[in-house]
Image (cartoon, coloured by chain):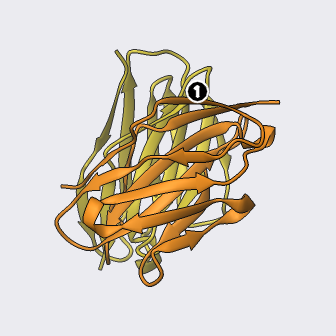
Chain colours: A yellow, B orange
Amino acid sequence: SQTIHQWPATLVQPVGSPLSLECTVEGTSNPNLYWYRQAAGRGLQLLFYSVGIGQISSEVPQNLSASRPQDRQFILSSKKLLLSDSGFYLCAWSGQNEKLFFGSGTQLSVL
Amino acid sequence: AQSVSQHNHHVILSEAASLELGCNYSYGGTVNLFWYVQYPGQHLQLLLKYFSGDPLVKGIKGFEAEFIKSKFSFNLRKPSVQWSDTAEYFCAVSPSGYSTLTFGKGTMLLVSP
């Protein structure tokens, strides 16, 4: 069966520090991969999605970037975190039928 | 930790039928509640949300949801569905004041013309 792993679960980082959040999917090949963010009190926002290795689409301009170095690996990065980057980050994947499956999320606090 | 249960994995309706999708959550404190929708070929988008106040929340495209605290429920309703409502619907919950979001497994709604 397919599983999705996302880590770390929580992260506290100082302003200006780098960020790397990792997401991996098992049990499927060539998934579509997504990074979402939810800020406190707001709805979910799509940040990036990828339909294949090295193929990244950005939905909103921001301080973040994403990479897909392997078929089932999706990484969210930043060179210098801002306070406004705080939030809950969710990785998700979908297959041919487009049904979404979510990771458990990473709570990022930038101080 | 909170959890979300969506009872129906697949729902098939005819156009003009009424819709109610169940969502129950478990969490000991106050919560924010959301319904998201993913139309075929599109990305996830917010349908409606509840933070506080009137427990009957109206969203886009004629959808509404009612928060019943005593039942830990946040069911989604629409009086008359259209073929264009065919989509996957996700219920989600986050503890008030936090952004941590937990999704249900989703309900696939198919509306036949």
Residue in the image at 53% along x and 54% along y: B76
Q: Residue B87: x percent and y percent? A: 66, 38
Q: Nearer the viewer, residue A1 or A22?
A: A1
* Image quarter hosting the N terminus of chain A: top left
Residue in the image at 32% along x and 54% along y: A106
Q: Residue furthest right?
A: B113
Q: Residue B22: x percent and y percent? A: 44, 46
Q: Nearer the viewer, residue B44 or A79?
A: B44
Q: Residue furthest bottom?
A: B53
Answer with the quarter of the image where residue A75 lies: top left
Left or right of residue B28, residue B35 in this image: right
Q: Residue A7: x percent and y percent? A: 28, 45
Mark 1, secondary structure of its residue? loop
Label 1 lies in what chain?
A
The kind of residue on which mark 1 rests is: Ile
Left or right of residue A106, residue A77 in this image: right
* Image quarter hosting the C terminus of chain A: bottom left
Q: Nearer the viewer, residue B109 or A99?
A: B109
Any part of residue A57 in sight: yes
Residue in the image at 26% along x and 66% along y: B70
Answer with the quarter of the image where residue B74 lies: bottom left
Count all numbered tags in the image, as a single digit. 1
Answer with the quarter of the image where residue B63 lies: bottom right
Residue B4 versus residue B62 in the image, above or below: above
Any part of residue A79 in sight: no
Q: Nearer the viewer, residue B29 or B42?
A: B29
Q: Residues within 10 Å of mark 1 (few under 14, many from 20)?
A: some
Residue in the image at 43% along x and 44% along y: A91
- For disc 1, the marked residue is A53
